[in-house]
C-alpha cells in the first residue's frame, strides 16, 4: 500500500483542491509491494482510476495482471476510499480504508488478502501513514504498517521518490509465529516525465529474510523499470 501515499503528496503539491477523475495505465518489470514480489518476478500491467472531490473525499481502484508469460494472469485488485483535509498552509491530514486482494502468481503460495484502515499526514514533499489490518492474510492475524515517503523535483520533468516502511504483527496464532518477525522495506525511485507519459526506475529491498516464489528463495533487492500513461 506504499503507492497510496504518493497521490496524497502529489495532490497537495499540484493544487489546493482536487476535484477530478483521473486514471493511468502502468507497465512494470516486476510488481513489488512492501519488499515482496507479488508477480513472482514477472512483468505486469496495472490500470488505475481515481476520483478526488473538492470536499476532500477521494477514491482509488486498481487492477493488476501478469503479462510476462504465455497466458496473461489476473493477479488482483486494490482499492481505497478516504478523506483528506488541509489543516494549514503546510500540513494536511487524511484517513480512510483500503482493501487488497491478490492471488498467488505461481499457485504455490496462499492469496494475499487484507483490509486496512489508515491515517496520514503530509507536509510539503513529505508524507507519512500508519495502517492497521485486523485480517492480514488470515482472519485472526492483525498487523501494523508504517511508512514515510518523500517526493521532490531536482530538475524540470524529473522526479525523485523515496520510501521507507516497517511492518509489525500484533496478534498471531501460535501456529503462525514462525516468520512473523518485524520487517522493513525501502525504495528509491527516479522518474522522467514526458507529458502524460512517465518513464521510471526504482531500487528496492527489505528484510529480514528472503522472498519465496516459483519454488525457491530470492533476494529482496531488486532493480525495476516501468512506464505509465496518465489521463
Image (tube, helix red, strand yellow):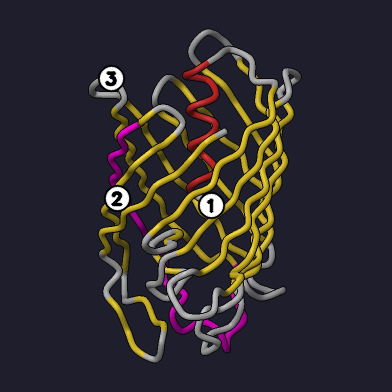
Label 3 neighbour load within 10 Å: few <14, some 14-19, many 20+: few
Q: Note whether 213 is above or below 84 in the view shown.
A: below
Residue at (31, 24) in percent of width and height: 157
The circle on residue 1 is 1
- The secondary element bearing badge 2 is classed as strand
CA–CA distance in space, label 2 to label 3 = 19 Å
Would you name the residue on which mark 3 appears? Answer: 156
* Res. 119 image quadrant: top right
Of callouts 2 and 1, the N-terminal one: 1
* Res. 198 image quadrant: top left
Residue 175 covered by magenta stretch = yes
Residue at (32, 26) in percent of width and height: 152
Label 2 neighbour load within 10 Å: few <14, some 14-19, many 20+: some
Residue at (55, 79) in percent of width and height: 104
Would you name the residue on which mark 2 appears? Answer: 202
| Pointers 2 and 3 in contact (C-beta within 8 Å) | no
Is residue 134 at all visible to an observer of this figure?
yes
Could you say which is closer to the camera, residue 102 or residue 211? 102
Residue 47 covered by magenta stretch = no
Q: Note whether 126 is above or below 201 in the view shown.
A: above
Please report the bounds of the magenta region as a residue range.
171-193
Could you say which is closer to the camera, residue 218 or residue 155? 155
Q: Note whether 226 is above or below 7 in the view shown.
A: below
Amino acid at each position: 500500500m506504499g503507492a497510496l501515499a504518493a497521490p496524497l503528496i502529489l495532490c497537495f503539491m499540484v493544487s489546493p483542491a482536487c476535484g477530478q477523475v483521473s486514471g493511468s495505465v502502468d507497465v512494470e518489470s516486476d510488481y513489488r509491494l512492501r519488499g515482496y514480489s507479488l508477480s513472482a518476478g514477472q512483468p505486469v500491467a496495472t490500470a488505475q482510476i481515481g476520483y478526488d472531490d473538492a470536499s476532500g473525499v477521494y477514491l482509488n481502484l486498481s487492477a493488476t495482471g501478469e503479462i510476462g508469460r504465455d497466458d496473461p494472469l489476473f493477479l488482483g485488485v486494490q482499492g481505497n476510499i478516504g478523506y483528506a483535509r488541509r489543516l494549514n498552509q503546510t500540513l494536511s491530514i487524511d484517513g480512510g480504508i483500503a482493501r487488497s486482494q491478490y492471488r498467488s502468481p505461481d499457485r504455490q503460495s496462499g492469496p494475499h488478502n487484507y483490509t486496512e484502515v489508515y491515517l496520514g499526514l503530509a507536509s510539503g514533499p513529505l508524507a507519512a501513514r500508519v495502517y492497521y489490518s485486523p485480517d492480514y492474510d488470515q482472519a485472526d492475524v492483525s498487523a501494523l504498517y508504517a511508512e514515510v515517503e518523500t517526493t521532490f523535483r531536482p530538475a524540470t520533468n524529473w522526479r525523485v521518490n523515496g520510501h521507507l516502511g516497517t511492518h509489525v504483527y500484533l496478534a498471531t496464532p501460535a501456529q503462525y509465529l514462525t516468520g512473523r518477525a518485524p520487517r522493513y522495506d525501502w525504495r528509491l525511485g527516479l522518474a522522467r516525465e514526458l507529458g502524460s507519459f512517465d518513464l521510471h526506475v526504482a531500487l528496492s529491498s527489505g528484510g529480514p529474510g528472503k522472498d519465496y516464489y516459483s519454488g525457491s528463495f530470492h533476494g529482496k533487492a531488486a532493480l525495476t523499470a516501468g512506464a505509465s500513461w496518465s489521463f
